[in-house]
Amino acid sequence: MVNSKMFILGIASAAFLTSCNPKEKTPETVDTTTDSATVQTPSSDSIAKVTPSAPGDTSENALDWPGTYEAVVPCADCPGIKTSLTINNDKTFSITEEYIERNSKNQDKGTFEWDATGSAITLKGKSAGYKYKVGENVLIQLDMDGKEITGPNKDLYVFKKK
């Protein structure tokens, strides 16, 4: 009788010890873990909505560009056009152009788009379709082809942030 109790106790101990040993992961368990990690990463669509249009450090993602910029740009038949342009984080803008020594003022608002390099914007308003290179606390007005304006008056196309 003592032998049978010892035998039963030995089997119970062996069963207990065996249940405490960690089991090896099967290939299915490893694959399931990998799949769940993949499922939890955002899809490429959601990444595209929160990331800038160009990878790396660009004017769009590395500079504090929202704000109001001002300049007096050249005018063909007046002393200049006092211009104030506000660009916002939500990719909207408002612009006011006041012709000096004239009783003429234009205002527009709309949206803007970043170029593929993330360094320039194009206004999309009712009348305003200007392009600007975005720099540190400056906007540089570009020509219609998206190139910097050259010549003796080029500095007049640099808008400074207020």
Image: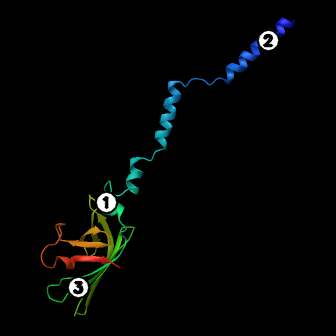
**Helix or strand or loop: what does disc 3 sit on?**
strand
Residue type for callout 2: Ile
* Residue drawn at (53%, 28%) of the image: 29
Residue type for callout 1: Thr
What residue is pinned by disc 2?
A: 8
Determine if residue 129 is in view: no
Snapshot quadrant of residue 145: bottom left
Which label belongs to residue 58? 1
The mark total stands at 3
* Residue drawn at (76%, 16%) of the image: 12
Taking depth in this image into account, of 124 and 2 the one nearest to the observer is: 2
Q: CA distance from mark 2 to mark 3?
A: 101 Å
Q: Earlier in the sequence, mark 2 or mark 1?
A: 2
* Residue drawn at (16%, 72%) of the image: 149
Query: Does the CB distance between marks 3 and 1 fall below 8 Å?
Result: no
Structural crowding at the residue carrying mark 1, measured as other residues with C-alpha within 10 Å and reported as few (<14), some (14–19) or many (≥20) = some
